[in-house]
Image: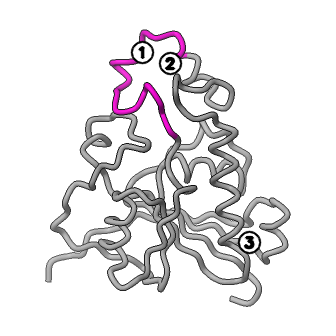
Amino acid sequence: MGDSVIVHLIRHEKTEANRLKKYVGWTDEPIIKNSQPLQLPFQPNIVYGSDLNRCAETAKLYFPNAQFKALFPLRELNFGEFEMKTYEQLKNLPIYREWIDYPEEITPPNGENFRHFTYRVTQCFRQIVVKPTTYTFVVHGGVIRLLLSLFGPSEKSFQEIAVNHRTIYTLKWPDTTSIKGGLRCESLLVEPIMEKENM
């Protein structure tokens, strides 16, 4: 691997609110139980994620022998009054429609400013990714979208990026200097997480 830095970003398993297409930010929902074994292409010793149960539970499911480091700054955006509501419930609110179009500029009522969200996530990310090795994160859709918008190989806005469950987003930099300097990764690999075939 040499001097390169590799980062695996994985969204947590679905929760009931995800299934119902609700905005779930700081609500601490469990994941929907999964009985089918999954096939992961690697097994890290350490996994980083937020302090919400859905990340810890997913990390335990995917990487049962890894140490999970739960970090508050890796939480999803705080959706404020939009929390646990669906598009259908919110679509007639002018402030919601503005936020959908300009999430970096408009803050949900009693929610989190996008600049603050960006600051806490990127500060935490930079404190973790400090040497040439491979890092694994089990985090939230918004966190992955943010990191891909900042560090993905091509310039895309937060709104343009979609992040799926059961998918590994692998970013690679040639060295730590590149990532410390805020440079975009040199490659991005997107792989589905497959269920193990029955023997």
Residue 178 left/right relative to 38: right
Which three-letter amino acid code belongs to the residue tagged 2? Tyr
- Residue under the point 44% across and 75% down: 68
Is residue 59 shown above or below 119?
A: below
Q: Earlier in the sequence, mark 3 or mark 2?
A: 2
The magenta stretch spans residue 80: yes
- Residue beneath disc 3: 173
The quadrant where residue 36 appears: bottom left
156 sits left or right of 174 in the view = left
Q: Which mark is residue 96?
A: 2
Image disc number at residue 91: 1
Cα separation between marks 3 and 1: 40 Å
The span shown in magenta is 78-97
Q: Mark 2 or mark 1: which comes first in sequence? A: 1
Secondary structure under badge 3? Answer: strand
Label 3 or label 1, whichever comes before in sequence order: 1
Q: x and y percent of residue 13 in the render?
A: 33, 57
Q: Position of residue 112 (x, y in %)?
A: 57, 35
| CB-based contact (under 8 Å), mark 2 and mark 1 | yes
In the image, what residue type sits under mark 3?
A: Trp
Crowding at mark 2 (Cα within 10 Å: few <14, some 14-19, many 20+): many
Up the image or down, 174 lies above or below 73; here it is below
